[in-house]
Amino acid sequence: MKYDFDEKIDRRNTDCLKYDFAAERGKPYDALPLWVADMDFRTAPGIIERVAADAVFGIYGYTESKDDYFQAVANWYQTYFDWTVEKQWLVKTPGVVFAIGMAVQALTKEGDAVMIQQPVYYPFSEVIRDNNRRLINNALVLRDGHYEIDFEDFERKIREEKVKLFVLCSPHNPVGRVWTKEELLRLGNICGEYGVKVVSDEIHSDFVYEGRKHYVFSTVAPDFGEFSVICTAPSKTFNMAGLQVSNIFIPNAQIRKAFLKQMSAAGYSQINMIGLHACKAAYETGREWLEELKKYLKGNLDFVKDYLENNLPQVRLIEPEGTYLIWLDFRGLGLTEAQRKHLILHEAGLWLDSGVMFGKEGEGFERVNIACPRAVLEEACKRLAQAVKRPIS
């Protein structure tokens, strides 16, 4: 490979959330962190060069994007997702969760029902509850190692609870589903029938494994754009979450106006200069780096799958169709929630994301970030296997 993803980079003492905040989060200092969803790889060279040039320039004033920024983003989605976007649709925010919060505030009122599909990325539920909306859960169903949507429950709850907004996670974090066109069509048709607006978090769309295809929600049917907010960002793809730039596409002018008004009420205006320039550089120069990264991540996935089958058959991998986050089923160990947490953190010395934070349906599961050098992943697997073999303390 042209890029060295095996390089182990010491991220400690860089104010890194993943490595430098164990004590503040109640974790042992030496716990191996495979939790928060950033990567342990340097980003693409073109991004580094642009950020370095901005740093040397030395003036970091108010900045806004011009047409070349939009063209870089638009070309990416046209080329790789067959999605033609219009300039007026674009709203830039410092993050996708921020955008979801703005949408919840703009498109619903206190006490309104907002639906999600747990187990799902936990900020979804936090944003809904913290804004005094009612959280409605259309729980995903695990059948034969594969998560499915309960469409009957989805429609019934929309009707009975008078759901106003649905937050879709596509591809799904943490269970790794890449929704088929047919699944998205069925979801969208139900939402359209009942007047439910859809916020689609598509931040992981660049990470889809062979044999699967990501469909932008608003492209699935001609009218879906009229009731959807599509959330995209280069942050997961190019490991630049700290630069805080996301591209939110809102085709419907009325929804967009309400969203922008809510952003104005929050006191937010321009994206930071370095984030803007890094995003443009990512979409213009980063494809070769991304293609190699995806091959490396597939190798990491294959390694974990083989290791578990040969050394830890009690721990079951839910085969992901997308993302670099894997969902492991630990229920085969027969441990209580407290015993499993102790085993993973204190016996194995691993800092993972406990499944229950994604909803009660995640109890007995753990989310693991495999976007790290393979040697780190191998160390994590060995630690876990050794801990499982020891008597439960």
Image (tube, rainbow, N blue to C red):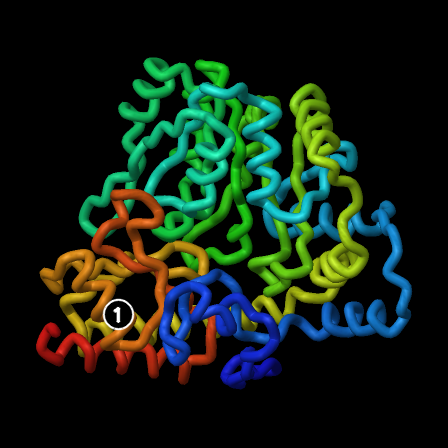
Tell me if mark 1 has few (under 14), some (14-19) or many (20+) residues whose alpha carbon lies within 10 angstroms of its own.
Answer: many
Q: Amino acid at mark 1?
A: Ile
Residue 258 vs residue 321: left or right?
right
Residue 246: percent from the left, percent from the top?
A: 66, 48
Give the residue at mark 1.
Answer: 344
Up the image or down, 90 lies above or below 8; here it is: above
Up the image or down, 359 lies above or below 254; here it is: below
Q: Residue at x 50, y 58 (%)?
A: 207
Q: Residue at x 30, y 53 (%)?
A: 355
Residue 208 vs residue 144: left or right?
right
State whether residue 208 appears in this view: yes
* Quadrant holding the C terminus: bottom left
Q: Quadrant of residue 183?
A: top left
* Quadrant holding the N terminus: bottom right
Residue 195: percent from the left, percent from the top?
A: 50, 15
**Total count of labels:** 1
Between 315 and 193, which is closer to the camera in this rendering?
Answer: 315
State whether residue 295 appears in this view: no
Residue 336: percent from the left, percent from the top?
A: 14, 57
Up the image or down, 271 lies above or below 85; here it is: below
Residue 343 vs residue 245: left or right?
left
Q: Quadrant of residue 115?
A: top left
Q: Residue at x 52, y 74 (%)?
A: 40
Residue 291 vs residue 89: left or right?
left
Element under disc 1? helix
Residue 323: percent from the left, percent from the top?
A: 45, 57
Between 20 and 308, which is closer to the camera in this rendering?
Answer: 20
